[in-house]
Image: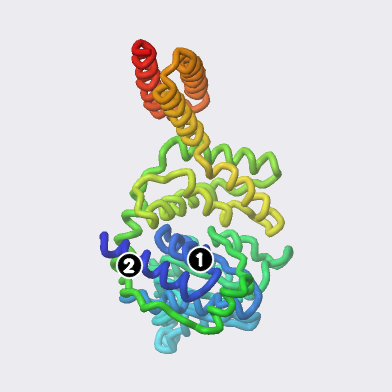
């Protein structure tokens, strides 16, 4: 498993170097694979959307990769395979799905919002439930992740809301912004190709991802994000919040941690909006809650207590000892006020409280010797 983790991190670094200014998107696609979710890339033509995904697919072995460009005139045969003529002769309407979407592990579908009614319902079921109905029989698909791409977002009235909702992570892809990055792209310098990652290794990584612990404190912050979004008139569905849990697990796992931290919530800025005009507001709100405010306060209190002790140790005066004692008692009082605010994290407060009391006792000992 350790080797597989190294491989996926090497793949991330390789793709991020090869495709400049696409680091967030590269990571988002890998997170979606680990969480068995789907990604949407929206941006103008020529922004390397298809190149990035096909390059990723080249470094995954043992699985099936499917890539297709849709148009308004695309037929079900293009995605799901042709109907078997032999079957038709027997009155069986069965498709040959070999090398098509139902048998793929990873798929890239370009211009996905050009899906027409002939293919939309079957694709929705396949993306959401990993089931394809062939001649009425449900067939389980090995599909892990679909990366959808489009030059534009769907417009109201196109009946594409359900398809848009299937993509848990959504990224806007723009042209390269920085001059030096543009030069790097023109030079086309690529790092050494990483070791390939097998489908079996990915399956193993997915199992470990699902085992990553999400503390109650993180769930409480997620609730606060939900309430703040609600105040702003933004209402992601309960399903979207539930599915997001595996994304934040994947984010922690990719960083080789077995417990989710507040910083892992940052990825939800690409998940918790429903309309494009909400995306910036969601980003600001999520960022506000990504900082572990309690940890920041406790670290500050602990550092302040140590600073007071150092002042007493250096000055060796009764005045400094009295001042330090007063400030440390104020710190202890402040910590006590934090406990009811964070009932699930009282132990953390008490650990810092204990350290401050030790520092206070050292100040008292120093004062005796003055």
In this rendering, does residue 333 appear at all? no
Crowd tier of the residue under label 2, counting other residues whose Cα lies within 10 Å: few below 14, some 14–19, many 20 or above: some
Image position of 314 with respect to 21: above or below: above
How crowded pointer 1 is (Cα within 10 Å; few <14, some 14-19, many 20+) is rated as: some
From this view, report whether residue 337 is shown above or below residue 248: above
Left or right for 122, reference 192: right
Task: Identify the image quadrant of the N terminus.
Answer: bottom left
Quarter of the picture holding the C terminus: top left
User: Looking at the picture, how far across and down is residue 104, in whole percent?
Assistant: 41, 74
Residue 201: % across, % down: 29, 66
Image disc number at residue 7 = 2
Quadrant in which residue 64 is drawn: bottom left
Disc 1 secondary structure class: helix
Residue found 47% across the figure and 40% down from its top:
218
Residue picked out by circle 1 = 23
Mark 1 and mark 2: span between their CA atoms?
17 Å
Label 1 vs 2, first from the N-terminus: 2
Q: What residue is at 41 percent from the left and 25 percent from the top? A: 314
Image coordinates for residue 42, horizontal then vertical, percent: 62, 69
The picture quadrant where one finds residue 150 is bottom right
The front one of 239 and 118 is: 239
Instruction: Name the residue at 44% across, 60% down.
Output: 31
């Amino acid at each position: 498993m350790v080797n597989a983790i190294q491989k996926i991190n090497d793949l991330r670094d390789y793709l991020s170097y090869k495709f400049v200014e696409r680091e967030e998107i590269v990571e988002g696609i890998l997170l979606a694979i680990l969480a068995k979710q789907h990604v949407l890339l929206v941006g103008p033509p020529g922004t390397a959307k298809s190149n990035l995904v096909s390059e990723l697919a080249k470094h995954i072995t043992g699985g099936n990769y499917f890539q297709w460009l849709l148009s308004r005139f695309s037929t079900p045969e293009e995605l799901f395979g042709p109907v078997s003529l032999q079957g038709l002769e027997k009155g069986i309407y069965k498709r040959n799905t070999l090398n098509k979407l139902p048998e793929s592990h990873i798929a890239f579908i370009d211009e996905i919002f050009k899906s027409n009614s002939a293919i939309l319902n079957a694709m929705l079921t396949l993306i959401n439930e990993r089931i394809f109905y062939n001649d009425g029989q449900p067939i389980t698909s090995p599909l892990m992740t679909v990366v959808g791409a489009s030059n534009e977002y769907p417009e109201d009235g196109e009946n594409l809301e359900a398809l848009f909702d299937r993509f848990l992570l959504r990224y806007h892809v723009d042209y390269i912004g920085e001059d030096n990055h543009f030069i790097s792209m023109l030079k086309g310098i690529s790092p050494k190709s990483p070791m390939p990652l097998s489908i079996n290794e990915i399956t193993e990584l997915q199992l470990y991802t699902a085992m990553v612990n999400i503390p109650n404190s993180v769930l409480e912050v997620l609730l606060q994000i939900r309430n703040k979004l609600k105040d702003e008139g933004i209402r992601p569905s309960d399903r979207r919040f539930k599915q997001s849990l595996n994304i934040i697990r994947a984010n922690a796992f990719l960083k080789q941690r077995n417990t989710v931290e507040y910083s892992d919530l940052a990825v939800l800025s690409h998940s918790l909006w429903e309309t494009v005009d909400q995306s910036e507001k969601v980003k600001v709100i999520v960022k506000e809650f990504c900082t572990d405010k309690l940890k920041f306060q406790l670290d500050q209190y602990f550092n302040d207590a140590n600073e007071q002790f150092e002042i007493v140790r250096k000055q060796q005066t009764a005045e400094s000892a009295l001042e330090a004692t007063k400030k440390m008692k104020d710190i202890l009082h402040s910590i006590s006020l934090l406990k009811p605010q964070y009932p699930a994290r009282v132990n953390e407060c008490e650990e810092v409280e204990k350290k401050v009391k030790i520092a206070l006792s050292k100040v008292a000992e120093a004062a005796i010797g003055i």
